[in-house]
Amino acid sequence: MKSKSKYLIIGNSVAAVAAVSGIRQIDESGEITLVSREPHHTYSRPLITYLLGGKVTEEQMAYRPADWYEKSNVNALLGTEITRVNPDEHTVETADGETLGYEKLLIATGGTPIVPGNVAGTDAAGVFTFTTWDDAKAIEAYIAEHGVESAVVVGGGLIGLKSVEALIELGIQTTVVELAETMLSASFDRTASELAQRRLAEEGVQVRTSTTTEEILAQEGRVVAAKLTDGETIPCGLVIFAIGVLPATEIVEGTDIEIDRGIVVDDRMRTSVEDVYAAGDVAQARELICGEKRCIAIFPNAFRQGDVAGRNMAGGDASFEGGLVMNSVTVVDVPTISVGVTEPLDDSYETMVQLDEDAYTYRKIVLHDGRIVGAVFVGDIERAGIITGLIREGLDVSNFRDMLISRDFGLIQLPTEYRRRVISGTGTRA
Amino acid sequence: MKRIIIHEEYCIGCGLCEVHCIVKHSRTGKIIRAFKEERDQIVPGVQVERDGYESFALQCRHCDDAVCIEACMTGAMHRDPETGAVLCDTDRCVGCWMCIMVCPAGAIQQGADGTVASKCDACTDEEIPVCVANCPNEALVLEDEE
């Protein structure tokens, strides 16, 4: 065996970075080896669409400063792919045939983009997924080389939306194809989705809903059109599949590590196998509101899980308080935030709504059993975090619920005890 | 680190903290010009909440366990190693508003031009933050913490 590290981390994005800082909170010197398939210094993955759209430079992609590995005393093996985890031996294998040993292992491999297997012609040149820096560079190069003027984005979720915005910036005529009845249906309610869709349409984006791609048509090996299931054929020089990601569990498949949708972890981020932890988009951890274990592929979740995993790997006692689905995304120029349950699940849920369609402002609070379980903000997002905090806390809001929807709502309307804790500054997690 | 402690029982909602914060973060540093010429370009880092006769002045709590740093997707939101203050590097902020989404105090705002986050910078270049120094009632005080 080439080496044995006290801590071995597979992954180099937010969960991995948070794990390093979590470990270093407790263990300043224990050897950390971080292995990443991608060759880049740790970068902000959500910025890849900003990079394509020319809104950030390559320098701005850095998620942590250039000397971060060194300062954190991390041995970073970038551009190294792990192919196999052997929990019994406490080792992993690299694609180059090397073996690395560990005392504690963190799997933070993230997600793998989905390319639907039932769509013909996806191997044509000009068909991309978009989840890495290299994807951004490849798409940029393809657009430049072939003078792409029109594109189809398959999937109207967050990655799809941000891809569309980048393509708009580049002056490319773009059509979004979404299987559901509205875009962003996974995180928004119907009203917010329709507002977002209308704003995109105003920017000249074509939106096709309740349909999907049946076949990618190519000439001389390059994409020339996307044929939809409803019969329409959309000429285009580029196709981006932005349907979503699946937990990247391949390297632990066939081991004793329990996999459901993702790698199943407890509240300490431990997998079913001793000394192996998982965090981030690959992990399936407890969700805050329903209590079931779910894969929630969002940034703050990944950070929190990585931090908890790191601390526990180093002998600490940290606990994950449960994941909460939330997204903040600006649609063209309309900021939006959605948190938790955005549509009532049954008659026992109540909603409070304020809508001004012309101004693109919308606020919605979803209540259940006297507690806030979800919220949507479009246009006016000021102080949305107060509501997020109340959702996390599970505070009974019955006494002041009518205030919640007001624009003037603030901390001052909240119960003194809760308010005192929030402003104490010691940290406010439920 | 030093932390600004809010004593709402002494706050009369006068708003001097906001005034001094705005002047401090103006280009000119002059009160009249800050208000007459620059007011629409400055989002104060402290805001007075009022409800009837109750009031208190709230600025970023510079939390020990700062959820905004965790949620920041670019790394712009960070803890200043020297002062412990939670600061936003506006060169790296892209205005994704994840910080606004998660701050339970509602203490982060969209900046005046709507492109980057704006928050209390703890007046790290002053011995005492101007909101504290100019509060007439000691409703804001600076205290040392472990």
Image (tube, rainbow, N blue to C red):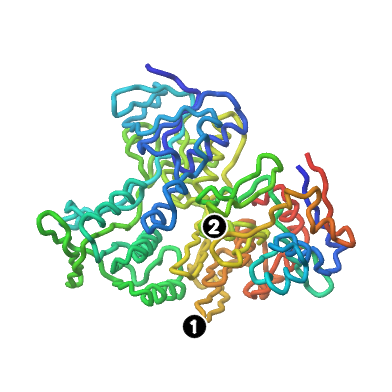
- Which amino acid is tagged 2? Met
Give residue B98's mark: 2
Question: Horizontal and vertical percent for residue A344?
Answer: 50, 70
**Could you tell me which secondary element the residue under label 1 belongs to?**
loop
**To which quarter of the image does residue A188 belong?**
bottom left
- Which amino acid is tagged 1? Asp
Q: Residue at x 39, y 21 (%)?
A: A89
Horizontal arrangement in the rendering, residue A257 relative to residue B45 (left or right): left
**Could you tell me which secondary element the residue under label 2 belongs to?**
helix
Horizontal arrangement in the rendering, residue A369 relative to residue A17 (left or right): right
Instruction: Answer whether residue A274 is visible to the viewer in this image.
Output: no
Asked if the residue at tag 2 contacts the one at tag 1, i.e. Cβ–Cβ closer than 8 Å, the answer is no
Q: Residue at x 52, y 37 (%)?
A: A19
- The chain letter under disc 1 is A
Horizontal arrangement in the rendering, residue A261 relative to residue B88 (left or right): left
Q: Residue at x 46, y 34 (%)?
A: A106
Give residue A209's mark: none
Question: Horizontal and vertical percent for residue A103?
Answer: 48, 23
Neighbour tally class for label 2: few under 14, some 14-19, many 20 plus, Cα within 10 Å: many
User: Which residue is at the front of the view, A191 or B5?
Assistant: B5
3D distance between C-alphas at marks 1 and 2? 25 Å
Q: Which residue is disc 1 drawn over?
A: A358
Question: Horizontal and vertical percent for residue A315?
Answer: 59, 29
